[in-house]
Amino acid sequence: MRILTHVTLGMALVAAGGLGTYGCSSDPDPTVSPDGGTQNPPPGTGTPAKGPSRGSPVALSDDDSVLVMVNRDVGTVSIFAIDYTGDGNSVNATKKAELPVGAEPWQVVIGSDNDTAYVVLRKDQKLVKITGLKSGGKVEGSVAVGSEPTGVALTPTGGTAWVSNWVDGTVSGVDTKTMQVTSTVDLNAALVKSGLLGKDVALRPSLAHPRSLAITNNLDAKDDDESIYVTEYYAQHVEKEAPDGANADRAKAGLVYKIKLADKSVSTIRLNPIADMGFKDSKGQTAGCYPNQLQSITVNGNFAYVSSVCASPKGPIGVVATVTPPDVSNVKTTTAGAVSVIDLRTDQEAAGTASLHARFDKLFTDKAAPDDATRRYPLAPVDMAFVPGSAVGYVVANGTDAAFRVRYDAEKGDISEVGSSTQLFVNLNPAGLAAAAQGKNPIGMAVSNTGKKFAFVANDVGRNLTVVDLNAQGILGGTEAPKVFESSAQPAAGSEAEARLRGKRFFNTGLARWSLKGQGWGACQSCHMDGYSDNISWYFARGPRQSTSLDGSFSKKNPSDQRVFNWTAIFDEVADFELNTRGISGGVGATVSVADPAKPPAATDRIDIAALGHSGLAGSAADAADPQNPLGLDPAGKLKDWSEITAYVQHIRPVRGASNLDPAKVAAGRKLFTSDATCQGCHGGDKWTISTRFYKPGVATTAALRTTAWTPPAGFPLGLLPAPDGSRTMRSDNGNAAAFDSIQCVLRPVGTFNVADDVAGIAELRQDMVTPGQGNEAIGKGFNSPSLLSVSLGAPYLHAGNATSLESLFSPTFKDHYGALSPNFLADADPAVRAQRVQELVHFLLSIDENAETVAIPKAGAQGGDFCALP
């Protein structure tokens, strides 16, 4: 879509007709220059754009005649003809076509000719050109770009489409006429130059992770005097973690890259932590948070607005259940929806940066809104769109089926108002709405470019398009006659595809039973957007734990081949995370004996899985939740939500390996991995980890694991054994199951406990920030080997994020880790030889994806391997 240009306020008033609520009623002739002269037609689409450009899952043409929406899971885009009624009080969207374009269309942008669209395909790693939108559209061409492209935007002339390549760490410039890549800007170099990665990291792929981008437009019909602003998806260390973890909420900061189109030079802009996220924890302490998982960037007026998940990993974390009533304060000090504001005149952060959870909480309090499920918070703010000609923006919250109105000061950039006089937020899925019209998990918004009072929201799980009445601040037509249009068909009822989609819904939402009061305080996706890792080390009950990417949870060749979960192997089923839903997000959860759709979920609905012996490694949480009631519970479970979430997790796609690697280094690195270091002794097999659930969970089986002994295989390295002789059992808990219960036989002590590089630092503490974390006990020592799938997204590494980069991971600081199965590995006397070998190994690791040739797990012995066995 197109929004207010990046110009001075005075020029903006001339170009847009003033900063009105819905923009100007007519636009200036784009071929007339500010001094009254005419301009030569620019390259590209032939007509200069009317404002800055950004990609989104939904795009509306400048004349409001055509709308294009991506259907991410289906591999299609839908083209709608937009027709307003004569009185301007209603609108229809007629689907003209649903075009197959390739796997995972992620964002789309429409050219200023109003008839051409460009779609970026995340899985297929392409940019696709669609022409003839007004007549139904056709795919005219495509070009390969980098790995995992997630963002696209057009220069003012339309001559170049710029694409952000999330895994490669680059942006690609594509000539829109020839559909050829004509320029590549390497953002990895800018991140290295920033010094945030430490002194030992040299230029290579997959250091940077550019997610979304926006391009400025000063209306002079030229490209070279504009800039691209690109979000770095992951927060970067700006302080070393203190030994007591006191600075954990401010040790990182967000980052945005600025690329000058004139010379392709790159600079960085820091997005600082929020000192007070608006809530106090259970100890009465003020909690801060830092911008992470930067979702979108939108240029409007003199500012760029960046939406993110603001992370607050410092403990205490979780519901305090030892008091009556339970203290839920910590639920509100974990993550928050946030928007950071950049002043484009100075390229510095502006005063408007804020936690939107806090701003809307104050609004709800001031308006005496009931503290129940009728409140919603901006969980997972994935997109932001502005009303053209104004400073009124709407933040789209994927986790709460809503959009949140925020008005900014057009000159200062700070927030002047949230909510509206008609509604506190835009509810895309209100009670009473027919199932086909429900706006489930919105991913993007486009606002009318011609001054109409409407906006259009793309809903991912709903697979539909919602028309929002910006006067009423709700769905046009209300619940009785909603203007909601199908974009793509839902899966067949009862199909596996339907189960996965439902699982995706439950994974992503913070409504109903999935967070505190169903208000949107947290969801699985808060730490695992798209099923991957947020790269944050959270102070959980067992210690600091880096979120693991879930694509390595199950083999992609055999969905029944599952990893044991968490860094200390404390869960063996996806349904075990019911306790996270209850204890971290404050939700009722889905393992319940009552599920009355006419009543809100309540804590009394829960099945007490702990009392029944089916929590953690005890019994089977999946069986306890199963409505088929295999355990014969009375009363039985009512929902199949956890089985559907499991189906979703089983099919999370590993990200593609980097496309800009050196093939010779990849080949040499593979040899080092398999022959010199014998890494497959911990990281082999289809899941790229030896961690495997070797039993079917059940009360008798998991209890028997406590007394089932294991014997060290002949030649197995003594330093890798997780327990001494006499204490070697498949499962152990050191006499304190709540603190130490784990599948002992999968643990490997590799010298990473309380060891960190000089950038990351470490605090080996549990969520109370006092008690030492698990991992260094004599019995049950070490950690559960993670999968190497998506290692290109995994920095920092290890259980506590204690290695800032792969280069750090192979530095002498972690020699006990990389030398665990080969003590002389990387012991080269010549520093140049050692550095070359590290480079080769890094390139190989960055190439690992589901298409990479796997390395077999060796038979347990001198080369490592797995010695877990059934009772």
Image: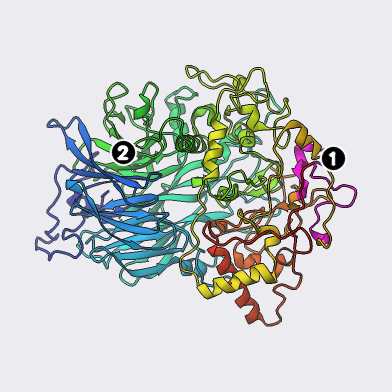
| Tag 1 residue | 707
The crowd level at tag 1 (other Cα within 10 Å; few <14, some 14-19, many 20+) is: some
Given residues 507 and 128, the one toward you in this image is 128
Q: Is residue 88 left or right of residue 870?
A: left
Q: Is residue 521 left or right of residue 388?
A: right
Q: Earlier in the sequence, mark 1 or mark 2?
A: 2
Spot occupied by residue 299 in the image (x, y as percentages of width and height): 32, 52
| Tag 2 residue | 487
Secondary structure category for the residue under label 1: loop
Secondary structure category for the residue under label 2: loop
Is label 1 or label 2 in front? 1
Q: Is residue 470 left or right of residue 618?
A: left
Q: Amino acid at mark 1?
A: Thr
Magenta region: 718-745
Q: Amino acid at mark 2?
A: Ser
Furthest residue in direction right, as rendered: 726
- Any mark on residue 194, and which? none
Q: In which image quadrant can residue 8 be found?
A: bottom left
> Residue sitting at 38 percent across and 50 percent down?
106
Residue 735 within the magenta-colored segment of the rendering: yes
Given residues 285 and 795, the one toward you in this image is 795
Spot occupied by residue 87 in the image (x, y as percentages of width and height): 13, 30
Residue 300 in view in this figure: no
